[in-house]
Amino acid sequence: QAGGGGTQILFDHDGPGPSPQWPNYIILVQGAPAGTTWSQLNGGVAHPPPPDASIQLTDTGGSFAEGDSGVSNFVFHVSRTGDTSGSATASWAVTPTPDDRRVHESDFDRGFFPTGTVTFAPGETAKTIVVAVKGDTIPEPDESFRLTLTEATGARIGAHRAETFFIANDDGGPNSVS
């Protein structure tokens, strides 16, 4: 109980457990009697405020054929959970993986590693990222890249912030898909 007749109420929005995440909410209610609970303040309903907004990738890896010519659009899904009442954004970037199967800038439509921003309007919970990959007829090993979410505003980046994906060889030779 705080001075002046206020009551502090701790709302643990991620629940009890061995590894609680922070921040949890501490609400100071002036003029409420000691021992007041969240349920009592909310008219007897025990629904706490929504958790903070979180943006994350919903695709967890995968492989896509590049095609023999033109451009193939690889589509990736992004979700927003928690408090969706405001707008939120997150930047994204495609980068090569640190192995010998990594992609090159020339594998992408404009000749550089794609970047962009996903923007959620109030109430929106799903968005897509489209990455344009150039097709070719050159037999080559499958190539890998990372799609990473960064720099969120109006939300935090969730657990699935980065995933590895593959451009599958569809041109014959070893590891070819058809």
Image (cartoon, rainbow, N blue to C red):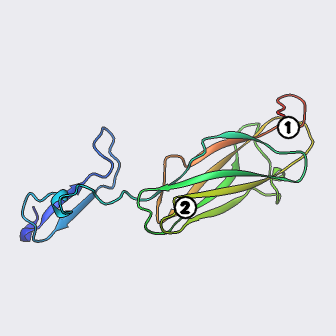
Q: Is residue 79 left or right of residue 20?
A: right
In percent of width and height, residue 47 lies at: 27, 56
**Front in this rendered view, residue 125 or 112:** 125
| Quarter that holds the C terminus | top right
Q: Quadrant of the N terminus?
A: bottom left
Front residue of this view, candidates 143 and 60: 60
**Res 60 → quadrant:** top right
Task: Tell me: residue 49, above or below residue 77.
Answer: below
Q: Residues within 10 Å of mark 1 (few under 14, many from 20)?
A: many
Which percent across, then down, holds residue 11?
25, 55
Residue occupied by mark 2: 151
- Of the two numbered discs 1 and 2 on the same chain, state the one appearing first in sequence: 2
Q: Position of residue 21 (x, y in %)?
A: 35, 48
Left or right of 73 in this view: 28: left
Residue corresponding to mark 1 = 170
* Residue sitting nearer the eye, 45 or 81: 45
Q: How many labels, in total? A: 2
**Amino acid type, residue under disc 2 in the picture:** Glu
Whole-angstrom CA distance, mark 1 to mark 2, is: 35 Å
Q: Nearer the viewer, mark 1 or mark 2?
A: 1
User: Of residues 8 and 75, which is closer to you in this image?
Assistant: 75
Using the rendered image of the protein, determine whether residue 98 is visible from the camera's viewpoint. Answer: no
Residue 103 position in % (x across, y down): 77, 45
Answer whether residue 172 is visible to the viewer in this image. yes
Rendered position, 39 above or below 87: above
Q: Residue furthest right?
A: 137
Q: Residue at 27% x, 59% y: name it.
A: 25
* Residue farthest to the front, as pictured: 44
> In the structure shown, which secondary structural element does the residue marked by tag 2 occupy?
strand
Residue type at the position of mark 1 = Asp
